[in-house]
């Protein structure tokens, strides 16, 4: 967790923080709702949600509940539910310890396959470099280590549950990924023409199809959440938002046995 806190402070020092009040209010509201349902699965998290002023369409969640949202993704998320899709997915990566798994892989890569004897708390230069690579804080070609396809699919499943428990319609996740696919295609980054074996992320069509299969279970969670918090969907990213309560008493997410 300490490594995540240190990395987040470094990002805040190196990346401009957005001063857009509407964007910050949106991220704080959606983030707090999701944190309320994910806290049982991420104990001792010190939740913090920061909007970074960047054209990059991305977001991340570091160990310890440190969440960064790049302003470039807000036009694609479009509304609260779209943002909940993204934040739920990123928080799910943290809950499932995917960053730690990637960090172990990154450390092995950077040490030529040798096992490091030092603890993570030592924060050596090798460890710091591995952490930056593992948690996606560098985008230099040849250094970034994306989540595996299995990790992405797992985070989609858990993230869908988180957003539903937070009172957001899981159907909106499909609409977000359709918008994101259109954005990627327009930006020249579509995975549609790439063989599946070479993709680090599920193909757009496959991802949406997989999410559709998960909808019945997620909609059951959403139905229960609506009785507690209502259904805060369909509000644009630039709108004013009224405060709302957060759900409680949720069952922790369990990771499937491999």
Image (cartoon, rainbow, N blue to C red):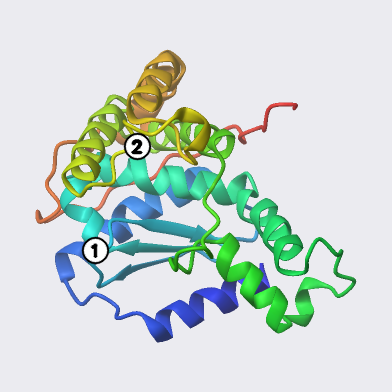
Residue in the picture at 36% in, 20% down? 223
- Mark 2, other Cα within 10 Å: few <14 / some 14–19 / many ≥20: some
Number of marks in the rendered image: 2
Image height of 20 relative to 191, above or below: below
Q: Which residue sits furthest right?
A: 117
Mark 1: secondary structure:
helix
Image height of 114 relative to 17, above or below: above
The quadrant in which residue 190 appears is: top left
Query: Mark number for residue 71?
Result: 1
Residue 52: x and y in percent read: 30, 71
Identify the mark nearer the N-term, 1 or 2: 1
- Which residue is identified by label 2? 191
Residue 12: x and y in percent read: 41, 80
Residue in the picture at 20% in, 77% down? 19
Towards the viewer: 121 or 134: 134
Residue 41: x and y in percent read: 62, 45
The answer to whether any part of residue 69 appears in the image is: yes
The answer to whether any part of residue 158 appears in the image is: no
- Mark 1, other Cα within 10 Å: few <14 / some 14–19 / many ≥20: many
Towards the viewer: 63 or 169: 63
């Amino acid at each position: 967790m300490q490594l995540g806190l240190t990395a987040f402070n470094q990002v805040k020092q190196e990346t401009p923080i957005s001063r857009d009040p509407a964007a910050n209010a949106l991220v704080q509201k959606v983030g707090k709702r999701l944190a309320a349902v994910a806290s049982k699965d991420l104990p001792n998290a010190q939740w913090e949600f920061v909007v970074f002023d960047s054209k990059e369409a991305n977001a991340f969640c570091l160990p310890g509940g440190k969440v960064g949202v790049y302003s470039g993704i807000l036009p694609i998320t479009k509304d609260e539910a779209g943002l909940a899709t993204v934040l739920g997915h990123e928080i799910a990566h943290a809950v499932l310890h995917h960053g730690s798994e990637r960090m172990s892989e990154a450390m092995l890569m950077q040490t030529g396959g040798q096992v490091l004897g030092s603890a993570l708390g030592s924060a050596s230069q090798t460890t710091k470099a591995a952490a930056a690579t593992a948690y996606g804080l560098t985008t230099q070609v040849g250094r970034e280590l994306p989540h595996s396809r299995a990790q992405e699919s797992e985070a989609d499943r858990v993230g869908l549950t988180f957003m539903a428990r937070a009172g957001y319609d899981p159907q909106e996740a499909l609409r977000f990924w359709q918008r994101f696919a259109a954005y990627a295609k327009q930006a020249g980054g579509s995975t549609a023409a790439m063989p599946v074996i070479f993709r680090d992320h599920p193909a757009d069509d496959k991802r949406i199809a997989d999410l559709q299969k998960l909808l019945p279970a997620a909609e059951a969670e959403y139905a229960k959440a609506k009785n507690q918090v209502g259904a805060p969907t369909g509000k644009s990213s630039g709108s004013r938002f009224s405060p709302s309560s957060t759900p409680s008493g949720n069952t922790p997410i369990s990771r499937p046995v491999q």
